[in-house]
């Protein structure tokens, strides 16, 4: 329901309210992984976290950035087989920091790489894969990241899992 309210506000020309601050990415990762721990346990998934050292903080909205990571992790959990590995990686990337979520799910055909970020598209179910969601999470995630000066994209092939990556401005 919260996603629908956010979409309605954005569609009505409402501004996305951000609270940019210096955000340590390990804090974002900790909040997100604490939130999805029960989902990981339900499917006996192995979560690996690989944070570069040193890792600059991001200039970001803590709540919205954490929401994006939780959404990406929830999708990875939904599409991953029982006992699979999920990996969160964070590293410096030029003037940005990069955070990614990799899974061992069924992968996404290239023709859906743009569509899955469109509202109500529901790409994976439409592609004949199990699961599926509201078609809002990735759209809202991309809007949250873009509004903060970053980018969000997917790299994926059928049978090889998916890697969703986003960037945010780095701060010293």
Image (tube, grey):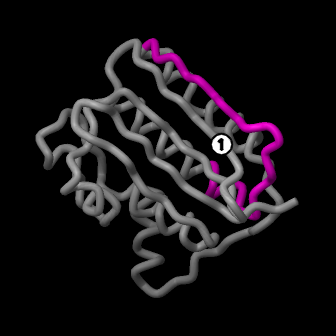
Image spot of residue 150 (x, y percent): 59, 66
Picture layout, residue 1 above or below residue 18: above
Residue 17 horizontal side relative to residue 111, left or right:
right
Residue at point 30% right, 65% down?
A: 118
Residue 131 horizontal side relative to residue 84, left or right:
left
Image spot of residue 18 (x, y percent): 68, 71
Q: Secondary structure at mark 1?
A: strand
Residue at point 80% right, 37% down?
A: 53
Quadrant housing the C terminus = bottom right
Residue 61 shown in magenta:
yes
Residue at point 46% right, 77% down?
A: 10
Asked which quadrant contains residue 146, the reply is bottom right
Magenta span = 44-66
Q: Which residue is the site of mark 1?
A: 90
Image spot of residue 75 (x, y percent): 40, 39
Image spot of residue 46 (x, y percent): 51, 17
């Amino acid at each position: 329901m919260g996603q629908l309210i956010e979409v309605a506000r954005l569609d009505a020309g409402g501004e996305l309210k951000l609270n940019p601050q210096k955000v340590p990415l390990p804090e974002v990762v900790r909040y997100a992984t604490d939130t999805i721990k029960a989902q990981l346990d339900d499917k006996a998934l192995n979560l690996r976290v690989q944070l570069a050292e040193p890792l600059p903080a991001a200039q970001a909205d803590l709540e919205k950035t954490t929401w994006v990571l939780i959404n990406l992790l929830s999708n990875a959990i939904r599409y991953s087989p029982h006992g699979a590995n999920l990996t969160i990686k964070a590293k410096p990337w030029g003037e940005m920091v990069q955070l990614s979520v990799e899974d061992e799910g069924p992968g996404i055909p290239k023709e859906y790489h743009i569509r899955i970020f469109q509202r109500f598209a529901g790409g994976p179910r439409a592609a004949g894969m199990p699961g599926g969601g509201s078609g809002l999470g990735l759209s809202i995630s991309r809007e949250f990241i873009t509004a903060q000066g970053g980018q969000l994209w997917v790299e994926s092939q059928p049978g090889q899992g998916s890697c969703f990556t986003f960037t945010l401005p780095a701060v010293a």
